[in-house]
Amino acid sequence: MAITLDDATAFRAAIGDHLGADTPADVASVLAAGVAMGEEAFRATPALPGQTALNLRIGRYVIRDDDLPVIETIGSAATGLATLAASAGIAWPAIVPAITAVATLAWTLWRKGALLTPRQLRVVGLLQTHGPCPVAVLAPLAAADGAGAVPETMLEGVLLSLKEVETRDGHVVALAAADTQGFWRARGV
């Protein structure tokens, strides 16, 4: 059953309410803001002619049943990132922008018809938190315990999958890129 909300504030609150119980309140607040930013960015994108049949933009906010697993996945990945950052001694204010960006990115992609796995979300979040870094630096962070943990043997595959993510409308977006020296960085939508 869909939940219909009148404004962005109610939408943000509903997102926070639907995050898993294991999501700390401070992380939930940041995630709800990030998802709301993603929804606003999606709404600001002009609809292409002939592509609005299943993507009505009517002014109200709607959370559909199929949105709930996405919200929970975003929450689990962000909680894992926050836990990892705390254990690495990174202060909460330093990780807030990365978590917000991951939530915004994941929601925007979901609304455009692409779904990231928890592992992909974790790797994008790590790239946004740690900036450009080689696989050798990223591997122990990605493999740390927590939601979306990526074994070292799978990391390069996840990174390569982030180079070409296809959306429902056929557009291909690169969420990660490597430079000539092998340093990976996150890219926006």
Image (cartoon, rainbow, N blue to C red):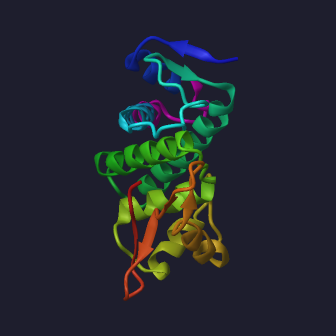
Closest to the observer, 144 or 174: 174
Closest to the observer, 131 or 143: 131
How far across and how far down the image is residue 144, in percent? 57, 64
Tally the marks.
0
How far across and how far down the image is residue 27, in percent? 45, 37
Identity of the residue drawn at 44% across and 31% down = 32
Identity of the residue drawn at 35% across and 56% down = 90
How far across and how far down the image is residue 129, in percent? 37, 59
Question: Which range is magenta?
Answer: 17-31
Q: Work out which quarter of the rendered image holds the N terminus and state it.
A: top right
Q: Quadrant of residue 127?
A: bottom left
Q: Decide if residue 103 is on the left or right side of residue 146.
A: left
Identity of the residue drawn at 58% across and 24% down = 63
Asked if the magenta segment contains residue 180, the reply would be no
Q: Can you name the residue that lies furthest to the front here?
A: 50
**Residue 10 in sight in this render:** yes
Q: Main secondary structure of the magenta part?
A: helix
